[in-house]
Image (cartoon, helix red, strand yellow):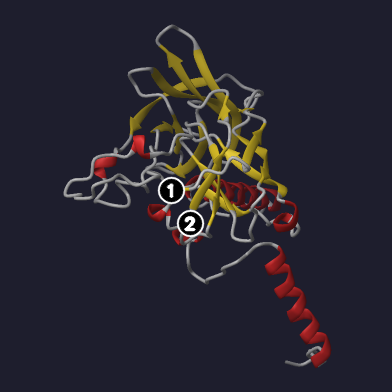
Amino acid sequence: MRGFSPPPPPLLLLLVVAVLWTTVAAGDHRVLAGVQPLSLIGIHRAVSGLDGSASVKASPSLLGLQGEDLEWINVEIQSLNASQDDWIGVFSPANFNSSTCPAEPGNTRQEKPLICSAPIKYQYANYSNACYTNRGITTLRFQLINQRSDFSFALFSGGLENPKLLAVSNVVSFANPKAPVYPRLSQGKTWNEMAVTWTSGYDIDEALPFVEWGLKNRHQTRSPAGTLTFSRNDMCGAPARTFGWRDPGYIHTSFLKELWPNAEYTYKLGHQLFDGTYVWSKTYSFRASPYPGQILCNKSSFLEIWERQSEMVQMNMQITSQAL
């Protein structure tokens, strides 16, 4: 390619070494293209090796005091027998021992596995501190989202393939784990209709779901929502029915109709409890579709759509994969 000259061999070698060193120092023990990181964990092979000299402490223990649905948490790790293969797994619900194991038709095992749910996140203990194996002390940071259940953090040795449980942290939870969160917008059946879908911990036996919405800074109206969910038995089989299962909560959808073209609307998710009280989400906004055939040459409108789509992609990645 014209105008491009590759770096000289010594400089290229230094760049390669720098990249490799960064990878090793970060604790990225195994990088495989196209492989979901959580699938590398042999959680069904986990054994107990609780170590009195090892401890895990998570703080703060209560999240979302100001209505937040996403927060960072510090996890302090101590281990006198620290090794480079130690790793922390994030479990939700917090109780992940054999008492939570569901019945498996056709299972002839004499004993239940030690752990009956897969972690939703993990990180090597030396990820942010290359001296962990020498000192046995480090702190990791994890970002948690409100997923309708509490959390705990477990320290394992033996790497991902043969995990040995060393210590378990205190329980961490959100102030309102059932709160309505993560609205997803989609075009309705007509050009002037918007579908709003969200997730909560409220069944229709507990509360009535709805959306309060309207033109920005104008009168707001309410539209009811339908509710769906699915259970473990709806899955085809293991691991979706076993250690891979996680309760999806309740999925609500409301349709906002007869929207004005290209107008800005605000909305918030609501649940009316049967004692007369309400649970509310944060306030969100969107811009309605233009009239069919209308051409918009407004750069800011394009940027707004792009930014909102980018935010939605990032949120969906948090919700669905909880990847590293």
For image coordinates 50% across by 14% down, the residue present is 278
Query: Quadrant of the image for the N terminus?
Result: bottom right
The one of 245 and 167 positioned closer to us in this rendering: 167
The one of 323 and 76 positioned closer to us in this rendering: 76
**Vertical position of residue 322 compared to residue 171: above or below:** below
Q: Is residue 61 left or right of residue 288?
A: right
Number of the label disc, if any, that sits on residue 206: none
Q: Residue furthest left?
A: 106
Q: Is residue 231 left or right of residue 301?
A: left
Q: Amino acid at mark 1?
A: Ala
Q: Position of residue 281 (x, y in %)?
A: 56, 26
Q: Which residue is mark 2?
A: 38
Q: Position of residue 112 (x, y in %)?
A: 30, 44
Q: Is residue 184 at all visible to an observer of this figure?
A: yes
CB atoms of marks 1 and 2 within 8 Å: yes
Q: Is residue 264 at all visible to an observer of this figure?
A: no
